[in-house]
Structure formats: structure tokens, C-alpha cells
Image (cartoon, rainbow, N blue to C red):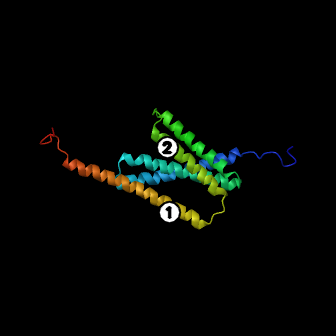
């Protein structure tokens, strides 16, 4: 039946792995940039988790987009595969570090998988460059909001530590 065109097309594992590798490179570049930002701004480690989630999600989005762009079809499947690869990678890193699964890690898995799917759908859509640029600008604004929140928390911690007394003068009854 392979000659009549009714056979299902095979999913190219080679392209999936190359797309995953490219997504890992994007993740690494984002993490390096965000680490430099954290060092420059003097942010606490509390800002590391959201920034790492953004970096991994950006890699998942890119790899899903690249895989679907090469395939020219089945964008959602391409995105699910790429997102699942990133989730598997996060799960392996988490298990190797010995940390149990927590609620926030499950949220990170969901966000990573979702952005992989979005990347896959965007890869097959005929979108203009303007739409992609607007999407990137929106994502960078949201990232800056997250950094601003982390800076605000650090300021509040420092400010409140100035007024904390070890022995309160009076205790309410």
C-alpha cells in the first residue's frame, strides 16, 4: 500500500532531535542572558525560578516552531513532541537533583508543554513577520514585569528589615 499514497507519513525523529537541540541552544542563550541580568541587577534567587521557566519555555516554543516549519504539517503534534521532550528533560533534572515533584514544577511542565504546542501551531501558520515581532515584544514586556516584581520584592525585604525590631516594645493582649 505504500505506492498509492494512503500510507501514513512517518514522523521524522532526526528533525525532531535537531529541533530539540536548537531549542536547547535557545534555552541556554536565554539562561545566560537572564543570569547576567540577575547578576547586574543584584536579584535574589527567588527570581531564578520564573526566569528559568521563561528560558525553558522559549526553547520549547522555538523547537516546536522549527519542527513544524520543517514539516509544513501536523504543527500541534510537532509542538506536543517538542514540549514533551523539554518536560522530560526538566523531569530528569528534577529527579537527578533529588527534589520531589511540587505543584510549581507541575505548572512549569504545563507551561512548557503549552508553549511547545503554540510554537508548533505558529510553525505551520502563514503569519507575517509583524505578528511574530509583536509576539516577541509582548513576551519581553511580560519578562520585564516579572523582573520588576522580583526587584520590588527585594526592595520591600530590605525596607522592612530596617524597621524590624528584635523585641517589640509592647505586645498586644
Q: In the shown orientation, is residue 18 left or right of residue 24? A: right
Q: In the shown orientation, is residue 173 left or right of residue 126? A: left
Q: Residue at x 57, y 52 (%)?
A: 61
- In the image, residue 77 lies at what x, y percent? 66, 47
Q: Residue at x 58, y 67 (%)?
A: 130
Q: Is residue 102 above or below residue 140?
A: above
Q: Is residue 63 visible?
A: no
What distance separates the C-alpha of mark 1 from that of mark 2?
24 Å
Q: Nearer the viewer, mark 1 or mark 2?
A: 2
Answer few, some or many: residues within 10 Å of disc 2's Cα (few below 14, many 20 plus, some between 14 and 19): few
Determine the secondary structure under disc 1.
helix
Residues under numbered marks 1 and 2 in contact, where contact means CB atoms less than 8 Å apart: no
- Tally of marks: 2
Q: In the shown orientation, is residue 12 left or right of residue 153? A: right
Q: Nearer the viewer, residue 29 or 4?
A: 4
Q: Is residue 131 visible?
A: yes
Identify the residue under disc 1: 137
Q: Residue at x 70, y 53 (%)?
A: 71
Q: Give whichever of discs 1 and 2 has the lower sequence position.
A: 2
- In the image, residue 114 lies at what x, y percent? 56, 48
Identify the residue under disc 2: 107
Answer few, some or many: residues within 10 Å of disc 1's Cα (few below 14, many 20 plus, some between 14 and 19): few
- In the image, residue 108 lies at what x, y percent? 50, 44
Toward the front, the furthest residue is: 173
Q: Quadrant of residue 144?
A: bottom left
Q: Residue at x 24, y 52 (%)?
A: 159
Toward the left, the furthest residue is: 169
- In the image, residue 111 lies at what x, y percent? 52, 47
Quadrant where the C terminus sits is top left
Determine the secondary structure under disc 2.
helix
Quadrant where the N terminus sits is top right
Q: Nearer the viewer, residue 101 or 19?
A: 101
Amino acid at each position: 500500500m505504500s505506492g498509492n499514497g494512503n500510507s501514513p507519513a512517518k514522523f521524522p525523529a532526526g528533525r525532531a532531535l535537531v529541533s530539540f537541540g536548537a531549542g536547547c541552544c535557545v534555552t541556554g542563550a536565554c539562561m545566560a542572558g537572564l543570569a547576567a541580568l540577575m547578576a547586574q541587577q543584584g536579584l535574589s534567587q527567588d527570581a531564578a525560578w520564573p526566569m528559568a521557566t521563561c528560558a525553558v519555555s522559549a526553547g520549547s516554543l522555538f523547537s516546536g516552531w522549527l519542527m513544524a516549519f520543517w514539516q509544513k504539517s501536523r504543527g500541534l503534534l510537532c509542538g506536543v513532541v517538542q514540549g514533551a521532550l523539554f518536560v522530560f528533560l526538566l523531569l530528569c533534572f528534577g529527579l537527578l537533583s533529588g527534589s520531589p515533584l511540587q505543584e510549581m514544577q507541575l505548572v512549569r511542565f504545563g507551561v512548557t508543554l503549552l508553549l511547545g504546542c503554540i510554537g508548533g501551531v505558529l510553525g505551520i501558520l502563514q503569519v507575517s513577520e509583524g505578528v511574530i515581532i509583536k509576539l516577541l515584544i509582548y513576551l519581553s514586556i511580560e519578562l520585564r514585569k516579572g523582573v520588576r516584581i522580583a526587584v520590588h520584592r527585594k526592595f520591600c525585604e530590605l525596607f522592612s528589615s530596617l524597621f524590624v525590631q528584635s523585641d517589640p516594645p509592647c505586645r498586644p493582649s
